[in-house]
Image: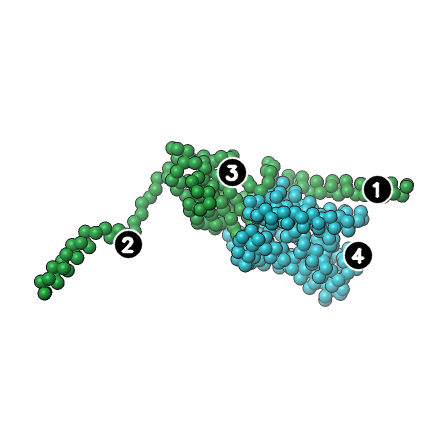
Amino acid sequence: MHISEGILSGPVLASGIALAAAGTAIGLKKLDADRIPRAAILSAAFFVASLIHIPIGPSSVHLILNGIVGLILGWGAFPVILVALALQAVLFQFGGITTLGVNTVVMALPAVLGYYLFGRLVGRRARVSLPAAFACGAFSVFLGAVLVGAALAFTERHFLKAAALVVGAHVPVMIIEGIITAFCVAFLKKVQPEMLPGKR
Amino acid sequence: MRAYALFVLASLTIICGTSDAGAHGTAWKPLKDADLKAVSFKYSDGEPMAYAEVLVFSPQDPKVEHQNGRTDRHGKFAFCPDMPGTWRISASDGMGHLCQALVKIGPEAAYETIDDPEGHTTGGPSIQGSNLLKMMAGLSIIVNLAFVVQFFHRRGKVSRERA
């Protein structure tokens, strides 16, 4: 889902930088000192997840884990994902430096929306929390793919074609991410339920 | 009348028989290796950019493509430059990944690349080293960054308590 350099237009890049800066500022303000170790672990998990590739026909896609990051950190997903993306761009040339803002928005904004949409449901009984966690993981990837299509569309490319291509390629990732998010939520409910949003 | 019709028919037959009917026919011939230039595209993890959309721009016209097509299943694409200069070949998979190659064609049509002949990666500064080492470096940076942030948080908290 990383957008490479040289694809997006100047206004789209500038908008991405502005939105990412705003989101990161809000995230840093809401991230208190007690949650920094948690944020570091999730940032590390996000960083490593992009190295796990799932072959899809002639191409391949990678895990994202923005759903579980959003559920646990909320707005804190912005600085966490920004740091991981910056390291991926420098060390692995995933995405780019100029597209860092747009890539951060593409992955962190769905995480925050997932937190608000599914956060309260995750703290309830397993019958509700596990499907909600699955939906959060899948929704975060789906919305990220749609945002990639929108970013390409604003650069004078066909939105429906680009979005359909990206969403279609990420359907297996949505399912896998949903399962991983559900497993993580089930595990956290047993060992440390206060980490989940509905239990705070 | 009948003779006249036969005369016209014969004339038409002679004219059409001698005209070049190649416009409706096809033919092929193999090209020499020297006429062909080829580029290989791959993702940063080494996987080929298979069936990616390719646009080739000549030195003469950087806006209208000289050729378009797709890479093969191994991420390779071949084209025939018809003039010396710098040719730009861009490959896009339609999902936000783009790679641009600059190929310099000399007057004698020698094939050379502007950048590292071993391959050029786009998307940011490149750091040499195995993927495992890079991953360890990234994780180390994240952990150390967390320590630094937490150190300054606690120092600020202690300062506020003393005040």
Query: In the image, which disc is placed on residue A172?
Result: none
State the image coordinates of residue A107 (x, y, percent, origin top left). 65, 52
Give above or below for A53 relative to B137: below
Please tell me if label 1 and label 2 are on a single chain.
Answer: yes
Viewer-proximal residue among A3 and A41:
A3
Q: Residue at x 72, y 66 (%)?
A: A128
Relative side of A54 to A123, left or right: left
Please tell me if label 1 and label 4 are on a single chain.
Answer: no
Tell me which label, 1 or 2, sits earlier in the chain. Answer: 2
Tell whether label 2 touches label 1 (CB within 8 Å).
Answer: no
Please tell me if label 1 and label 3 are on a single chain.
Answer: yes
Task: Identify residue for label 4.
Answer: A194
According to the rendering, which colour does chain A have? cyan
Task: Identify residue for label 1.
Answer: B156
Tell whether label 3 touches label 4 (CB within 8 Å).
Answer: no
State the image coordinates of residue B12 (x, y, percent, origin top left). 17, 57
Secondary structure category for the residue under label 3: loop
Q: Residue at x 52, y 54 (%)?
A: A57
According to the rendering, which colour does chain B have? green
Q: Residues within 10 Å of mark 3 (few under 14, many from 20)?
A: few
How far, Cα to Cα, is label 4 from label 3?
A: 49 Å
How far, Cα to Cα, is label 2 from label 4?
A: 77 Å
Tell me which label, 1 or 3, sits earlier in the chain. Answer: 3
Q: Residue at x 74, y 50 (%)?
A: A26
Name the chain under label 2. Answer: B
Nearer the camera: disc 1 or disc 3: 1
Relative side of B109 to A136, left or right: left
Q: Residues within 10 Å of mark 2 (few under 14, many from 20)?
A: few
Secondary structure category for the residue under label 2: helix
